[in-house]
Amino acid sequence: MSFIQNLQAAWAHNNSLLCVGLDPDLAKFPAHLREDPDAIYQFCTAIVDATADLVCVFKPQIAYFAGESAEEQLEALIDYIHLNYPHIPVILDAKRGDIGATAAQYAREAFERYQADALTVNPYMGFDSIEPYLAYPDCGLIVLCRTSNPGGSDLQNLEVRVDAKEGKKLYQHVAQLVAEKWNPHGQAALVVGATFPQELTDVRKLVGDMPLLVPGIGAQGGDVQATVSAGKTVAGAGLMISASRSILYAGKGEDFAEAARKVALATRDEINSHR
């Protein structure tokens, strides 16, 4: 089953548009885990077990693992999700973007070493930096479009002209490129932040039912109702609305997983109330 098919099944099976981002920060872990050599794996698998029936996708952020030399724990975590929750796809959040030969190695890393179902990538270097990932047509390719951080406006909101046509925003041009030219296998999705609901509306109009990964609710302050209204498809789906810190660190004690589940359940239900 392809990433897109698995995602569609997860939307329906769990009645959820919630993505839980797995960003393990040892400084925020409960005290009883911090000295465990496998603390990251133990923490993340506990979060996965507590929330797996509430999500449509899990999204580990590679920097939090690599920064702690915990790449083997990342591999084990993705294996754990695939073994125990095969109906929940895994997005490796790495935001890769480099020349074609290097991109081919990043693709091997994501899809062969880590066995991720999808990968976030940066389109700034153009199609030849995206093309190597297309050799894995069952894997998702999630392209940065309009990101949730304030600095995204430095470039993404710039007006560009293509073939002497009327100007448009750079993020709109990226959305059209991905939807019309860079998606030959139907495996693509876009990243559009919840902090910019008008831009989310614009992108949805440009790309039809293409899935959108939407970070920015929870700790970043994006409004859930505005996000769902702006980004949902006619069928009330099409979104992977990501929350990380607000769920992962809802509790500070040994009951951290139970606390995370409560916040994930409330977030999932709040999202659904606006579908």
Image (cartoon, rainbow, N blue to C red):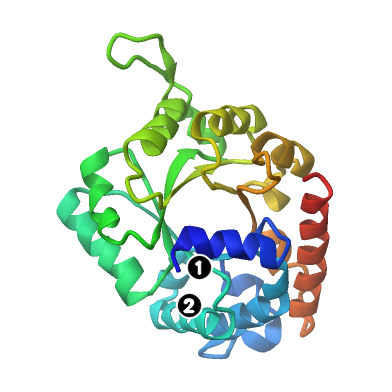
Nearer the observer, 19 or 150: 19
Residue type at tag 2: Ile
Q: Looking at the image, do the residues carrying marks 2 and 1 touch, with CB atoms under 8 Å apart?
A: yes
**On-image quarter of the N terminus:** bottom left
Tell me the CA gap for discs 2 and 1: 7 Å
Residue sitting at the far left: 101
Left or right, 69 with reference to 4: left
Vertical comparison of 82 with 232: above or below: below
Position above or below: 159 against 268: above
Query: Is residue 244 visible to the viewer in this orientation of the structure?
Result: no
Residue pointed to by mark 1: 90
Q: Is residue 98 left or right of residue 194?
A: left
Instruction: Measuring from the top left, give residue 274's x and y in whole percent.
Output: 81, 44
Quadrant in which residue 173 is drawn: top left
Viewer-proximal residue among 213 and 63: 213
Count every numbered label the image shows and give the total: 2
Task: Please indicate whether residue 89 sits to the left or right of residue 161 in the image.
Answer: right
For residue 78, which numbered disc appears in the image? 2
Question: Mark 1 or mark 2, which is nearer the start of the sequence?
Answer: 2
Q: Is residue 150 visible?
A: yes
Residue 127: horizontal and vertical position, in percent? Answer: 25, 40
Name the one closer to the observer, 40 or 109: 109
